[in-house]
Image (tube, grey):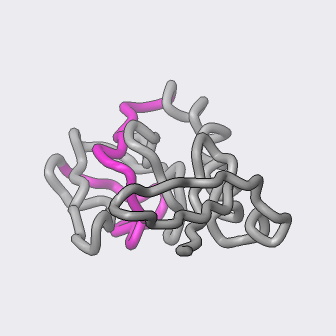
Amino acid sequence: MRKFNVTVNGKAYAVEIEEVGGEAGAVVIPAAPAVKAAPVAAAAPAAAPAPAAAPAAGKGEPVKSQMPGLVKKLCFANGATVKTNDTIVILEAMKMDTPIVATKDGVITYSVSEGANVDTGAVLCTIA
């Protein structure tokens, strides 16, 4: 019998899988409160500040995440002037660093912080 923790649509489950003669049977058991306190559950509140900063998108052009990942580095300070194609964020996904570049010249305002987990399409910053 092998045990796994699986998260589906934000809800965590403890799953036990038993291999029987080449066939696998699964039993799904609702997660214990200890699983909800795991770092996976702690990552959800970190994503909440990004939508709160979304109104700033009206003050400039939003730069969105092209993939889910971890914000490894913010390359400029808030309020700094950036030029088109400057690397503004380093996003880590699947152990690879992906540079996110400025889409235009302007003043940058970040909507995320280093260490935050983001989804595809999340607003990383705006450039006005």
Name the image quarter holding residue 14: bottom right
Of all residues, the one furthest to the left in this rendering is 85
* Rendered residue at 53%/74% (across/down): 2
Q: x and y percent of residue 4 in the render?
A: 56, 68
Of all residues, the one furthest to the right in this rendering is 33
Which of 4/81 is in front? 4
Q: Does residue 24 appear to the left or right of 87 in the view shown?
A: right
Pick the quarter of the image with the N terminus. bottom right
Q: x and y percent of residue 41 in the render?
A: 69, 61
* Rendered residue at 45%/41% (across/down): 122
Q: x and y percent of residue 8 in the render?
A: 58, 45
Is residue 126 shown above or below 30?
above
| Residue 64 included in the magenta stretch of the image | yes
Which segment did they paint magenta?
Answer: 59-83
Res. 111 in view = yes
| Residue 52 included in the magenta stretch of the image | no
Res. 127 in view = no
Q: x and y percent of residue 93 in the render?
A: 31, 64
Is residue 76 shown above or below 107?
below
